[in-house]
Amino acid sequence: MLDEVLTPEERAVVARAREFAERHVAPNAARWEWERRYPLETIREGCKAGLHTIELAKKHGGQGLSFSCKLRAFEEISRHDFAFAFAMINHHNAVARFARDGQPTHVARLLPRMIAGEVIGCAGLSEPGVGSDFGGLEMSAVKVEGGWKLNGAKAWITNAAVAGLSVAYAQTDKAQGYRGIACFAIEADHPGFQRDKPFELHGGHAIGVGGFRLVDYVAPDEAVLHPPGQAFKAALAGINGARAYVAAMCCGMLQAGLETAVRYTRERKTFGQPVLDHQGVRWRLVDAATDLEAARLLTYRAARLIDEGGDAVLPAAYAKKFATEMALRRIADCIQAMGANGLRAEYPLARHLACAKIAAYTDGSIEMMNERIGAGLSQVFGAQVFG
C-alpha cells in the first residue's frame, strides 16, 4: 500500500533491502541466535548496501529519501530477523542525527567512519533505573573548562555491544527537570567510557543490547549536539518515527509467520485433508491476516504524516500499540496452527515471537502507549455534543 506513493528510487531501495535480507540475513539469523552473537560483519555489509543512509541528507553523503522509504525497507528486513533490523536502523538513526546536529569539525572527523561501518552508532537514553520516564535521567553532566564532565550509566541500549559513538542524554541541572537535559556525542575510545558486558536474553541477541558507564568522562564542547533546553524536545521529535517503524517491523514478522504457517498447513495433511482446510485452523489464520492489514493501515498512515510534517503523536501511538499487541497474539497463532513443528528452529516463528515481546517494550511500552492515547481521549472525543 505505501509503496504506491514512493518514488521509483525509493521503491528500488525497498527492493534492495528485500534482496539483502534474503541473501545475508535469512540464512544466518537462527545461527546468530544460537550463538548469542552480534553480527557485526553483516551490519557492515548492510552499510555497503546503503541501508544506513536512506534518510541521511545528500550533502552528508546520504540518499536523502523519505521516512516512509526507510520504514518499508526495514519492514522487509524484519521478515527475516527483527533483531538485525533493529540494530541496523539504530545505527542509521545515529548516523543521521550526528550528521544533522553535530559540529562541522566533529562530523567531518567521525561521520565518514560511521558511513563506512567502522564506527557503529547507538542512542543513549535508557538507564538502569530509568526506562520510559525520560525526564528522570540520572546521568549527570557538569560544565567544566572546555566541555562537560559526565558520570552515570546507560542500560538496554541497542548496539551497545560494539558501538563506538553514542548519542547520549544527560541531566545538567536536576532542578530544571526535562529542561536541564542535554545531548552529547560520546566516543567509546575516550577515557572514562566503560562498556558493560552485553545482556544475555532469551531472544534477539543480534540487537547487541547492553549498556555503558561514564566515569568522569569529559565531552568537549564540540560534542554537544543539543544544549540544555533543546535536547528533550529533540529527542521527542524522533519518538513518533521510532514507534512507527517498530510497528512496521511487527508487520514484517507477522507477514513471515503467515507465509510460513499457510505454506505448512497447506502441505501437511491430517484426517485425510490439508490442515489449512480445517475451519478452526483456517479461521485462526484469517484473523491473523485481517489484523496484519489493519496494523499496516495504522502504521502507513503514521508514516505519511511524519513525512508530511503532520501531527503523528496519536497515529504513531495507535500503530505501536496495535501492532505490538497484534504481533504477540497472531505470531503465536501461526505457531499454534503448525502444532509442535512451529517451534522447530528451521522455522522463524519462535524467534519472531520473542522479538515481538521485545518490540512491546522498545520506544515506549504498550502501557506507555495506553497513557499517551488516554491523554488524548478528551481532545479527540470530548468535544462531541449529543442531543
Image (cartoon, helix red, strand yellow):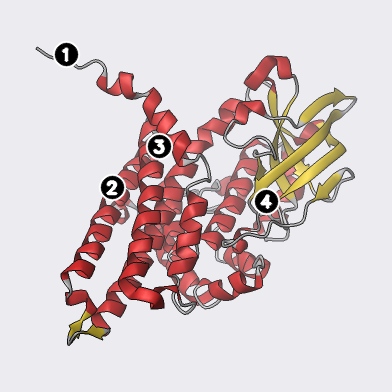
Instruction: Judge the density around disc 3: few (<14), some (14-19), many (≥20) Cα neighbours within 10 Å.
Output: many
Which amino acid is tagged 3? Ala
Amino acid found under the numbered disc labelled 2: Leu
The disc placed on residue 135 is none
Residue type at the position of mark 4: Gly
Do the residues under discs 1 and 4 have CB atoms within 8 angstroms?
no
Work out which residue is located at the far left of the displayed protein and give it: 387
**Viewer-closest of 174 and 227:** 174
Mark 2 is surrounded, within 10 Å at the Cα level, by few (under 14), some (14 to 19) or many (20 or more) other residues, namely some
The residue located at (72%, 57%) in the rendering is: 198
Q: Which mark's residue is nearer the viewer, 1 or 4?
A: 1
Q: Estimate the x, y position of residue 270 in percent, counting from the top left.
A: 23, 84
Label 2, on which residue? 297
Give the residue number, with chain letter if any, for mark 3.
317
Q: Which quadrant does the C terminus fall into?
A: top left
Who is closer to the viewer here, 83 or 128?
128
Query: Which residue in the structure is indicated by mark 1?
Result: 385
Mark sitting earlier along the chain (3/1): 3
The CA span between labels 3 and 1 is 26 Å
Q: Earlier in the sequence, mark 2 or mark 3?
A: 2
Q: CA distance from mark 1 to mark 4?
A: 50 Å
Task: Say left or right for 265 vs 120.
Answer: left
Q: Which one is earlier in the sequence, the residue at label 1 or at label 4?
A: 4
- Classify residue 83 by image quadrant: bottom right
Classify mark 4: helix, strand or loop.
strand
Q: Earlier in the sequence, mark 4 or mark 2?
A: 4
SS for callout 1: loop
Q: Which residue is mark 4?
A: 121
**What residue lies at 72% left-to-right and 19% top-to-bottom?**
174
* Badge 4: residue crowd in 10 Å (few <14, some 14–19, many ≥20): many
- Residue 266 point in image, percent of width and height: 24, 80
